[in-house]
Image: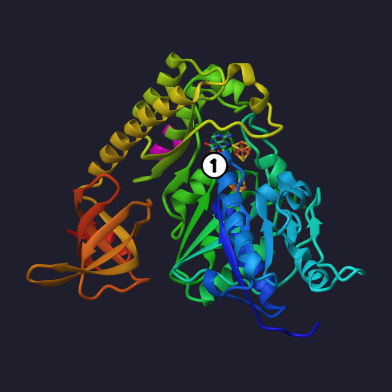
Amino acid sequence: MEKISKKVYIETLGCQMNKSDTERILGILSHFGYLPSDENKADFFMVNTCSIRKLSEDKAYSKLGVWGKMKKNNPDIKIAIAGCVAQQEKESLLKRFPYLDLVFGTHNIYELPELIKELETQNPDGSRKRICAIRDKAVPEKEFNIIRSKGINAWLPIMEGCNNFCTYCIVPYTRGRERSRSVDVIINEAKKIIKEGYKEITLLGQNVDSYGKDLDGKPTFAKLLAELDKLEGNFRIRFTTSYPTDITDEVIETVKNANKICECFHIPMQSGNDRVLKAMNRRYNRAQYAQIVNKVRTQIKDVTITSDFIAGFPSESEEEFQDTLSAIEELGLDYSNTAAYSPRPNTPAGKMVDKFIPADIKKKRLETLNNVVKIASKKSNEASVGKIYEVLIEKIKEKDIKNGSKRIAEGRSRNNKVVHFESNTANVGDFVNVEIKEALLWCLKGVEISSQSKKETVVLEAAK
Ligand code: SAH
Ligand code: SF4
Ligand code: F3S
């Protein structure tokens, strides 16, 4: 195909999986002459959408509206919608948004070259092509460049899709059934990431513990982690998301013994009440969740455990909601993402219309929940004071103060806490040992003690 130079702007909404997809889409488009650009210079606009809540879906539509207005003055621009909303709404989007040129779903990314080629042709009557490409099953992955966002963290998808069908959730419908990438493909991608200089790799999957169940030989997530840990280089590994009862002893053991895998688990609980958990079709109760958390905590020193909670699930009573609050306190969850329940099309909970909780009550519960999360976060941060954390620097800020400027390094500890400290020498991408002196609500402040690795510091401390 003839190379033309065009400029593409992609607005990415939603989870890390979407961010990773955008990096892949940009890579594919670059093979066809489309270079990433700022929004005000682009001639191809794409929104990579999220459908987890109505609010995220609406954000996508308002973006399309802005570009639709631009198209009135500049009819040559192309507008596309990708991701979970595209997968969910399909052709109806072409009808609803007359200025839209391309709709493609989460399973069609590797089909983009053909779609782009077709988009650049015209209909026999000379009118512009409008395409909707949605599949039920993913087209196989092909090798293309990946245009990763700059920085020190790289996303690395290991599996996609979900077989769990929690009653509130759209993801199984928008991402399909669980599919794992092969160990070789993942290892090779990890090696490239390290070679490019990234210092942190985050392994992505809707349920990372389901990794490998669909592959020949059934490699486990723990095995994959162990293989990645063996790779040479100075880098860290993180992973998300863990389904509570799918976390195996082997995974806990692997994280405990590894060098590069960070001590951090994101284990969404969703509710602290057994009846609500059942109505959500979560496969555990409060006691089983607590058991997992305690097991992880006892095995892995300084581990951070974060969670997700939904306030106002259909039929949730005030007392049941209180169980969520008490769970956060009782289990000492370090941080939690929260959301008010949002009905999603065609999901079982979305059909429980007569059990919906009124918006004002959901709002109130969400506020209460957020306050409890805040208190838990502060408490967790306070427990870090006096500890020595290995911090990977992500940003350097010059802070103006009365008597000159201060150089503040900002990064994250292995257990994923944001740490700020003053330093004249630390640079982005450095690993620095920091003694924590002060706990704020969402971050920690400390002083630099050395640039040795955490293990060396531990040895030094033992020798004292
Ligand atoms: N795979 C992960 C969650 C992915 S979705 C897991 O199993 O936990 C991310 C979070 O969005 C969920 O944990 C849930 O808390 C929230 N969420 C999903 N559907 C929602 C809905 N309909 N309304 C409100 N929050 C929702
Ligand atoms: Fe959604 Fe449940 Fe699957 Fe998580 S496990 S993606 S919440 S259906
Ligand atoms: Fe949203 Fe789809 Fe991710 S619904 S949270 S972008 S998997």
Is residue 247 visible in the rendered image? The answer is: no
Tell me the quarter of the image containing the C terminus: bottom left
In the image, taking residue 417 as reference, residue 159 lies left or right, namely right
Question: Is 200 rendered above or below residue 274?
Answer: below
Name the kind of residue labelled 1 in the image: Leu
Residue 8 magenta: no
Find the magenta span and give its range. 294-299
Q: Which residue lies at the image location 34% right of the left edge and 28% below the top edge?
A: 329
Q: Position of residue 400 (x, y in %)?
A: 16, 69
Of helix, strand and loop, which one carries label 1? Answer: helix
Asked if the residue at label 1 sits under 8 Å from ligand 1, the reply is no
Question: Is 330 rendered above or below residue 117?
Answer: above
Q: Which residue lies at the image location 67% right of the left edge and 83% below the top edge?
A: 5
63 or 164: which is nearer to us? 63
Picture quadrant where residue 6 is located: bottom right
Q: Position of residue 444 (x, y in %)?
A: 25, 52
Q: Name, please, the residue furthest toward the left.
A: 403
Q: What residue is pinned by disc 1?
A: 55
Q: Residues within 10 Å of mark 1 (few under 14, many from 20)?
A: few
In the image, taking residue 177 as reference, residue 411 lies left or right, namely left
Picture quadrant where residue 421 is located: bottom left
Dominant SS type (magenta): helix
263 or 120: which is nearer to us? 120
302 or 26: which is nearer to us? 26
Picture quadrant where residue 332 is located: top left
25 or 394: which is nearer to us? 25
Q: Which residue lies at the image location 23% right of the left edge and 76% below the top edge?
A: 425
Q: Position of residue 152 (x, y in %)?
A: 44, 68
